[in-house]
Image (cartoon, grey):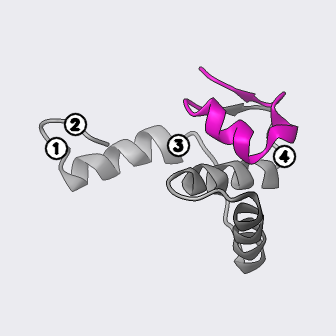
Amino acid sequence: MPSQPRIPPPVAWQLIQSNVLATFRIVSLNEADYLMLLEQLSTAGIVGGVTYDALILHAATKVAVDQIVTLNERHFQRIRPDLSDLITAP
């Protein structure tokens, strides 16, 4: 996260523990998930930073979430237009 002054690593870890780990569930992706996703992205011609959005989206769909909230609506919809009804901005 770009901020000035930089957040020291111990403070960043504390923020992650209290704001992320206490609230959200960690979803693991396995080898098959990565290979399938890489093939889909390659076929669709999707490259660059949006591939990280694809990883997030895949993890969300793997656990069948009810809603996907993102600041990158356009990227997520480009990756999975079939899920447009689940993708929303805050």
- Residue 64 is marked as 4
Q: Where is mark 1, residue-wise? A: 6
Disc 1 residue type (three-letter):
Arg
Image spot of residue 53 (x, y percent): 60, 49
Around disc 2, counting alpha carbons within 10 Å, would you say few (fewer than 14), some (14 to 19), or many (20 or more)?
A: few
Number of numbered discs on residues: 4
Disc 3 residue type (three-letter):
Ala
Q: Where is mark 3, residue-wise? A: 22
Residue, x 50% and y 53% (percent of image)?
A: 49
Q: CA distance from mark 4 to mark 3?
A: 20 Å
Q: Where is mark 2, residue-wise? A: 3
Q: In this picture, which residue range is highlighted in magenta?
A: 70-90
Image spot of residue 70 (x, y percent): 60, 32
Task: Check the image and name the residue furthest to the left.
Answer: 5
Viewer-closest of 49 and 24: 49
Tell me whether the residue at label 2 lies in contact with that at label 1, contact meaning CB atoms closer than 8 angstroms. Answer: yes
Task: Check the image and name the residue furthest to the right.
Answer: 82
Image spot of residue 4 (x, y percent): 15, 35
Q: CA distance from mark 3 to mark 1?
A: 23 Å
